[in-house]
Amino acid sequence: MALDYFAPGVYVEEVDRGSRPIEGVSMSVAGFIGFTEDVRGDAELFKPMMITNWSQYLECFGKPGSDGYTDFDAYLPFAVQGWFLNGGGRCWVTSIGTKLPGSTAPPLEETGIKLPTAGKKPSLHFSLKPASDDAGGALALPSAEDGRIAVIIEEGEPKPSPEDTPEDELPLNTGEYFTLSIKRGDEILGRYENLTMKEEPDTEVADNVITALADNELLDVVNISLSGGPLSRRPANGNYEVVPPPYIAPNMNRFSRDLQGQRDDRTGTQGMYEVDEVAMIACPDLMRVYQDGLMDLEQLHGVIEMMISNCENAFPGPAFRMVVLDPPPVKPGKSPNPVPPEQQKPQDVATWLKEFNRRSMYAAVYYPWIKVANPRKAGKPIYVPPSGHMMGIWCRTDESRGIFKAPANETPRGVIGLAYETNMREQELLNPVGINCIRNFASYNRGYKVWGHHTGFLDFVNPLT
């Protein structure tokens, strides 16, 4: 039975022939919360943004020309990519930052924008002037409503000479002169004409660019040009977007507030629950902050509990909303600290669930973590939480087969390995407590399969399903 009718197509509809069939529940829209490389375009920090394909994700959450991933291996980009690879349609993404909490601010040369010369050599560097936010002293990204600041370089000319200047004394336009404009969207914030890279120009002819912009309240400008004449060091004409400094939560208290957010202003995790069409939610970067020692296991459980409770109390949103959880890589009873995902055995994840001691029909968990290619590190594989890939399979199954088909016995796309290869006897331990397994059936020539379809931590699970 078709669930969405938003575009032309051929749909199958059920005809009423007496008793009502089981009502379909669309699991076609996902919500992701986590770290991103950038926040650009119409996207805003801490607020959900609708994304319909990977290219759109790069436009909103990747730097220009980037692959969209991060240098600190944030898991959200892998989850969103896994969602689309496995058949997911539109989703909503909330960025909770572009750096881990407490990270050292990047050096000046890594923020802002470098303007090149026509010969592709460095000329000028522009960056936003530091401005603290009110709550924590961290540099904040501008909102999408304000838009990003851009620097436009155009052809210029020397200043007009007095009318009585002899013709042979008029300054020549050597091509070194340029006009610089500062814009936000269509609004011109400043325009500077008759500029040159010459350090001490004749001010009756042109102004040094650094001197001319000294009183500018928005941008810091630094001359990073190499030796040479003013023409060879002149910035090339073009439109350059000034990349703002990353948002860095100064401490875990601030990060916890950012992560939780508020439903009133639709921010953070709480804000995702205000998007009515979102049917399944995941926060894969909970594992990132846990692995980096920024959040302990009890704090992690607190966030998971909040997400489950919000799904259970989804009114007035959809009562079928699910949270897809990733098992934290921990060996309970031995150490509360994280371990590499490949060291977590089936009995460890079963013990973790027992100690977490939470059951809900509105939560699902998948084990083990999956191995995928990491574009940021020349394709070298990395283990990532499976939630994004699994949610994509949910969507694919619902749209290709229907809600009557369980999202099991399906091949996860983009997966090249598993952190642990569970066998039949080990799954007999996990299946009755509602932990779904991803298994390797290479011996049967079937590849990797999602082997289990429990949509929650149930008080009782039929072990035959």
Image (cartoon, rainbow, N blue to C red):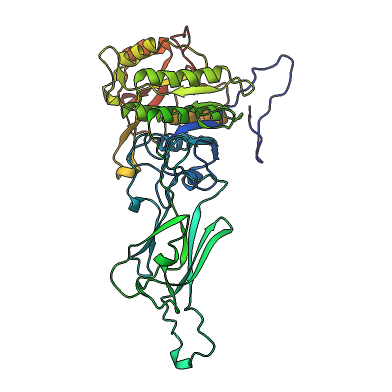
Indicate the quadrant where residue 398 lies.
top right
Question: Along the horizontal axis of the image, is 100 left or right of 280?
Answer: left
Residue 152, x across and y down, in percent:
49, 63
Which residue is at 33% across, 53% downward? 109
Indicate the quadrant where residue 464 lies.
top left
Residue 54 seen: yes
Count the numbered circles shown: 0
Q: Quadrant of the N terminus?
A: top right
Which residue is at 51% across, 21% downward? 406
Residue 412, placed above or below residue 168:
above
Residue 89 seen: no
Which residue is at 47% across, 6% downward? 460
Residue 413, placed above or below residue 378:
above
Question: Along the horizontal axis of the image, is 444 left or right of 324?
Answer: left
Which residue is at 33% across, 44% downward? 376
Residue 321, x across and y down, in percent:
56, 22
Question: Along the horizontal axis of the image, is 128 left or right of 332?
Answer: right
403 vs 240, nearest the viewer:
240
Residue 440, x across and y down, in percent:
34, 25
Residue 103, placed above or below residue 327:
below
Residue 400, x across and y down, in percent:
55, 31
